[in-house]
Image: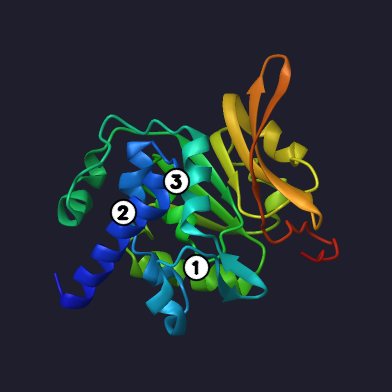
Amino acid sequence: MSAEGQVSADERARMVEWQLRRRGIEDERVLAAMGRVPRELFVPPHLREGAYADAALPIGGDQTISQPYMVALICEQLALRGGAGSAVGEADGARQEDRALRAPGERVLDVGTGSGYQAAVLAELAGEVHTIERIPELAESAGANLAAAGYADRVHLHLGDGTRGLPECAPFAAIAVAAAALEAPPALYEQLEPRGRLVVPVGGPDGQWLEVVVRTPEGPAVLRTVPCRFVPLVAEFSAPADG
């Protein structure tokens, strides 16, 4: 490993310990995934020195790469189990070699690709990851980021309106939304498999909460978790909101 690579690995380890574990993230699979994905490859080059800061960072197009803690919390709330061939604890080289041998895990949808970082983390946790981005320039840069980090063959990148989901790829065991909606988008809920989970920031400029919506036979079961702040979720043909 190069000296630069070792520095990044050390920064990831500190991030996992101080920003995640000590703040209440308990899922060891999530902690291990956050410790493997090179966040510095998903931020603009001029911001890479601060890639592991405890903050969201701008990525262009009035969008951000989410704070590491929020990415970890969303992933934890999805409650993914992964396949029997999960790579927790493996070295990078072994992980690359063993991909083809893994047992299938859950199918997951990531709404609002942004930089591609959350999709990469989800690729460490699930068997099949689809991510959708409405801004062509961001989708293009996210594809380049995912390729540079070694995830091009594990994340299916789509261009389109995330509020509509991807019905052609449904059902999903879990759906993560990286932008705030006034309510959980009904189309996304309908694309969940039974007992599937939708994690979405809900609210407006006056306040947002991270909601977990579980699909049950009785209808949506909703749990509010923590206050949060995300850019607005924009649907096709709608006007951008302030926030």
Q: Which mark is residue 142?
A: 1
Mark 3: give few (<14), some (14-19) or many (20+) Cα within 10 Å: few
Q: Position of 240 compared to 96: left or right?
A: right
The x, y position of residue 139, in whole percent, is 56, 67
Say left or right for 209 vs 138: right
Q: Are marks 1 and 3 in contact (CB under 8 Å)?
A: no
User: Residue 79 in the image: x percent, y percent?
Assistant: 47, 32
Which of the two discs, 3 and 2, labels the residue nearer the N terminus? 3
Assign a secondary structure to mark 1. Answer: helix
Colouring of the image:
rainbow
Bin the neighbour count of mark 1 within 10 Å (Cα to Cα): few under 14, some 14-19, many 20 and up. Answer: many
Q: Amino acid at mark 3?
A: Arg
Which label's residue is closer to the chain start, 1 or 3? 3
Position in image of residue 235 (x %, y %): 78, 56
Is label 2 in a helix, a strand or a loop? helix
Name the residue at 70% across, 32% down.
190
Q: Which mark is residue 23?
A: 3
Q: In terms of secondary structure, where does tag 3 sit?
A: helix
Residue with the mark numbered 2: 35
Q: Residue at x 65, y 75 (%)?
A: 61
* Location of the N terminus (image quadrant): bottom left
* Mark closest to the chain's N terminus, 2 or 1: 2
